[in-house]
Amino acid sequence: MKNYPGPDLSYHDPADPNPWLALSLETTTPIRPEVKEAWLRDSSSKSRQLLLPFARPLARFFIGFNQVLKAISPLQINWPLILHRFLVSGLKTFVRRDANYLILRHFNIGSEILAFIAANVKGANVPLNPLHPITLNDLLDNVFLKHDLNLYNFIINLNREVREKGLEIGPVAFEDLDLSMISEDDFDIKDLPNRWLNFIDLETAIELYTPVFQFFLPDKDFWRSVNSLQLDETIGIYAAKITDKPEHLILLNNKHPLVAMSTLRAGHRLVLHGLSSEMLHYLLVMLKREKMKHVRAAQ
């Protein structure tokens, strides 16, 4: 991923410190360096500063409007193919390169995290449906919808295995951890448009597209998708148990899956979900690197 203009981090005035410089230099948050650069460039954009304050209340209004409309209308719209064509067209035309990069990464890292958990619950046989889009056109295959379905199906199938076979999701010895599915590279993401119209940041795009997502799907599908965000806690606990590193759970923001939350804040919660996923994946990358060092040292 090439560098593109972002905040000026070359100058520091103690009387007027640059918050983006502080976040760039700070290293306690585990996140891939290239991802952090893209995230900070996107977050410091004029779009986020000027458009997001208007996009967020507008999006929440239409979420409420759609909710009422779907409750009283006899017609239940279920057009996932049209939805994905609309979303991909919008991403190509209006969304920043950094934001599209982060979106495509999300499906890849999500698939690898689920594969890691499945491989390290010994005795479990959990079917997976990995998603590895590397271009925006790859998203046309209902990838946004499949991403949520994969998560629910994974949790259902994993826990059926655990119950039926008397298994346990617990610590795996460091030398026995299977990290083969965790990628250290950047997934070869390509063909990201960077024209003058590609100006909308990640968070604003998510806010604007959330009511669109809601409109083109049945109400139960949208509700299921929004509440999948709270499964961050469930996946985080699985990973923490397997790696025996519970301190990593402090990074979670979407919590308490037994308490369904309002769909109005879905956009902001989705951004937090993306960040938590990036952090968990990078923790697994660092764990893989540590294991490789041990292997080389033992040879």
Image (spheres, rainbow, N blue to C red):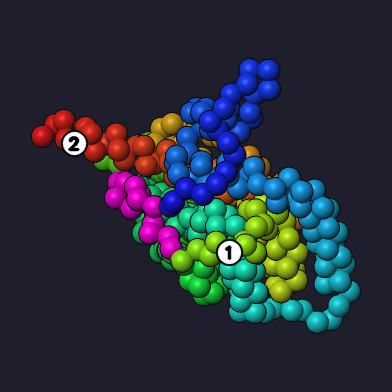
Q: Can residue 166 be seen from the camera position used here?
A: no
Residue 236 is labelled as none
Specify whether 84 is left or right of 65: left
Task: State whether residue 7 is above or below residue 112.
Answer: above
Instruction: Determine whether the residue tagged by mark 2 lies in a helix, strand or loop.
Output: helix
Q: Residue furthest bottom?
A: 75
Distance from disc 1 to disc 2, alpha carbons, whole Å, reads 46 Å
Residue 179 colored magenta? yes
- Where is 17 relative to 110, above or below? above
Estimate the x, y position of residue 201 in percent, counting from the top left. Answer: 65, 53
| Residue found 57% across the figure and 27% down from its top | 11
Could you tell me residue 294's position as x and y percent?
21, 32
Q: From the viewer's perspective, tell me whether residue 80 is left or right of residue 259.
A: left
Magenta stretch mostly in which secondary structure? Answer: loop
Mark 2 belongs to which amino acid? Answer: Val
Q: Which residue is mark 2?
A: 295
The residue pinned by badge 1 equals 195
- The residue that appears at 49% across and 45% down in the rendered structure is 35
Residue kind at label 1, given as amino acid type: Arg
Q: Where are the magenta residues, as a range?
A: 178-190
Q: Residue at x 16, y 35 (%)?
A: 296
Q: Are marks 1 and 2 in contact (CB under 8 Å)?
A: no
Q: Residue at x 80, y 61 (%)?
A: 63
Q: Is residue 237 magenta?
A: no
- The quarter holding residue 97 reads bottom right
**Image position, residue 86 (x, y; %):** 65, 74
Q: Nearer the viewer, residue 277 or 157?
A: 277
Element carrying mark 1: loop
Q: Nearer the viewer, residue 25 or 270?
A: 25
